[in-house]
Image (spheres, rainbow, N blue to C red):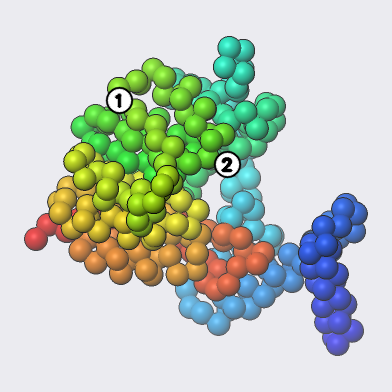
Amino acid sequence: MRELIRNILMLISNYLFYKRNGKQDKDVNELLYKNYLIYRKNKIIRYLEQEEGYDKEISYLKKQLPYLMSIDTEKVKRIVDRIRVETHVEYDNEKNMFFIIRNNKKLYMEKKLNSVDKVLDYYSYLAYEQTEESPHKYLGNGFEVKKGEIIADCGAAEGVFALDNIENADKVYLFEYDEDWIEALKATFEPYKGKAVIEKIFLDDHDEEDKVSLDTYFNEKDVSFIKMDLEGFEYKVLEGAKELLRTRDNISLAITVYHNKNDEKVVREYLKDYDVSVTEGYLMHQWEEAEPPYLRHGVIRAKKRIR
């Protein structure tokens, strides 16, 4: 047993050395990385075995490594593979971008996704995230974008949330700071000029040069539905929406809460005047290096409580 432990520790140490020093020996890296992942998985299982209510998740983890943040690897792979087969990809020669057809609408991809395979790799998991089986689904269980909503899509990326709800909305504001996505967003929402507003703005809790808070942006504008998927900056952007959330009575929010270990806790506390629910199931975000809790809910759905 001691010899086994020494070997595992040596493999981990070697992997971390290779990672720090950027070594490119593919075979060695893959061997070290695989052993490192097994070590991490077993560490997480031991942690969960000390908690209550995770029998199903422990069973999944004992059978396989997590896949794309998901625990039920086999189910997710089946869904992703099905989406990949069913997805229709085309190339726009005029715009020099690939696009896919989603619900009879064109969804353009950034130019870095410059092959059919890259588009399918990206889109198949993106589409899975918004299926009923995913803990990452923004809407569901009666929590929907209603007719006439004014949407703030914070962290729009490729714009799939806005595109899926453009027909119901009166207006959609898409906030995205990544220049690579801006060009794709303009192409996707070209048919909705006047209804879709694309803003290359860095949302924050204060205003500074190219940064702006939601309080400032919507000071004289209406908004009724806010979706946030900001790679861990959700709480900071919420801090910049204090007045907005305090003074508007009709706002609903869908907020990702898995990027940082305490996201769900702090967002729940912040939204104490809201009726809050979370998506079913768990995500394992960056589980290879994450701190507990390893299993995190994907999205908080919130609607202001009627007094």
Nearest the eye: 223 or 144: 223
- Expressed as whole percent of the image width and height from the top left, the position of residue 225 reads 27, 43
Q: Which label's residue is closer to the chain start, 2 or 1?
A: 2
Residue located 53% across and 35% down the image: 179
Q: Which residue is mark 2?
A: 125
Residue located 83% across and 82% down the image: 5
Nearest the eye: 47 or 95: 95
In which quarter of the view is residue 290 placed? bottom right
Q: Give the residue furthest to the top.
A: 94
Residue type pointed to by label 1: Lys
Mark 2 closeness class: few <14, some 14–19, many ≥20 residues within 10 Å:
some
The kind of secondary structure element at disc 1 is loop
Q: Please determine whether, in this image, residue 93 is positioned above or below residue 189.
A: above
Q: On the picture, is 247 further left or further right than 282?
A: left
Asked if the residue under mark 1 is in contact with the one under mark 2, i.e. CB atoms within 8 Å, the reply is no
Residue type pointed to by label 2: Tyr
Residue at mark 2 to residue at mark 1: CA–CA distance: 28 Å
Q: Is residue 141 visible?
A: no
Residue located 35% across and 64% down the image: 267
Position of the C terminus by quadrant: bottom left
Q: How many marks?
A: 2
Q: Which residue is mark 1?
A: 195
Position of the N terminus by quadrant: bottom right
Q: Please determine whether, in this image, residue 171 is positioned above or below residue 207.
A: above
- Expressed as whole percent of the image width and height from the top left, the position of residue 171 reads 27, 31
- Expressed as whole percent of the image width and height from the top left, the position of residue 273 reads 20, 63
Q: Please determine whether, in this image, residue 115 is positioned above or below residue 225.
A: above
